[in-house]
Amino acid sequence: MESQIILILFGGFFLLLVIGAPITVALGVSTLISFLYLDENPIKFVQIAFTSVGSFPLMALPAFILAGALMEAAGLSRRLINVAESFAGPFTGGMSAATVFACLFFGAISGSGPATTAAVGMLMIPAMIERGYGRPYAAAITASSGGLGIVIPPSIPLIIFGIAALGMPAPPEAVEKFGQFQTVSIPKLFIAGFMPAFLIAGSLLLMNYIIAKKRGYTGSAEGWSARQIWCEMYRGFWALMAPVVILGGIYSGFFTPTEAAIVAIFYTLIVGTFIYRELNWQKLFTALETTTWLTGRVLLIMFTATVFGRLLVENQIPAVIANGMLSVTDNIYIIWALVIFFLLFVGMFMETLATILILVPVMLPVAYSVGIDPIHFGVVMICCLGIGFQTPPLGENLFIASGISNISIENISVAALPFAFINTIAIFIIAFVPEISLWLPRLLGY
């Protein structure tokens, strides 16, 4: 029975993808066929799907998407980029280094890789080209840095992982062998993402310096200007305060991540309307339209992916896969290598949020079986999928960077390969050294 369900579920899913069906349709149809094969009442499909989009933590998803869209419309993202650029100065590859920092800044208020790439790329790609950077390189460093948007908190994929993992307790045999695992919570995941995000940013800066030095991408001749840095920080003060207000409120316990998203919206509305005075009705409606389209797309995938995952769990399919992997080896480092390469491969072809919802029920039991902490596993998973934004054929950041720079996806993909390579090395370090993810949450008492 198990082998037949696996064949029907995954066979139907991949067949529909091959013939060009949208991922939501592929998930929904393959799951519904499996339900009918098991003689389950189809109404159960609808009930599980409806429950999946009715959780309180999920309210943070559309709210953070709206907050990111409003911050771009209100001029906050432009001011953050100007602050990052003022620090570039004479540093070799300074403009591209500023792009990495700008993606970190904007990622800390948007939680989205494509949104970060679009907001930063619109300003930084033309600026880098004007300074003599090659078009493919300018687009590649922006697309690669945009992946930081889903690692640095508040990260939308971390929210989705947290929601998916909450319903996946550790198997009793894993608890008996390794002791009690810590519970999964979204604030804990957010804190755990900080150090890995800075490690990945550091790896990007290192590769940027090596390539910039080789190609002669020098910084400005004037050197650093303390006056310019101070002026940009003064102009961007309220933009710089946005991540402080959002993340400070979450980590101080003043409000939950969901409430923080609502605070971010009102903060941006007040700053954009009364302080920067750039937010008008037209920009507000554009931001609402963007939020509606993105949220609807995400919720449709969640709707079907949750039922797909529930069917996997109910039929013990994750246990079969975990036992299959553990029959090959129980070495935690080899397991990590298999997981990382698998996620990197899947990230090239599947949308990030769908990947999380499909694979968490499959892979989290494997992690528990070898004693991997769920928070640590979640951070590594999101870091791996972040590389998917910069690798073809699906890489969303590549399409955005291509549209801005007006060059082909192929050229950008080749230029992005060194950054994907150095990011992969950084991910292996994060996986093999759990304290990089777990030290900060432990320090703050989580």
Image (cartoon, helix red, strand yellow):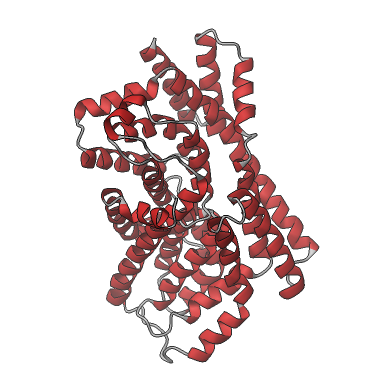
Residue visible at 60% across and 11% down in the picture: 41
Q: Residue 72, located in which quarter of the rendered image? A: bottom right
Query: Does residue 408 show up?
Result: no
Residue visible at 25% across and 37% down in the picture: 335
Q: Residue 73, located in which quarter of the rendered image? A: bottom right
Whole-percent x, y for residue 181 in the image? 37, 37
Q: Quadrant of the N terminus?
A: top left
Whole-percent x, y for residue 95 in the image? 44, 76
Whole-percent x, y for residue 264 in the image? 65, 59
- Number of numbered discs visible in the structure rendering: 0
Q: Residue 55, located in which quarter of the rendered image? A: top right
In the picture provided, is 274 more to the left or to the right than 81?
right
Residue visible at 64% across and 16% down in the picture: 43
Residue visible at 40% across and 41% down in the picture: 182
Please, which residue is most extreme toward the top here?
Answer: 39
Whole-percent x, y for residue 98 in the image? 45, 73
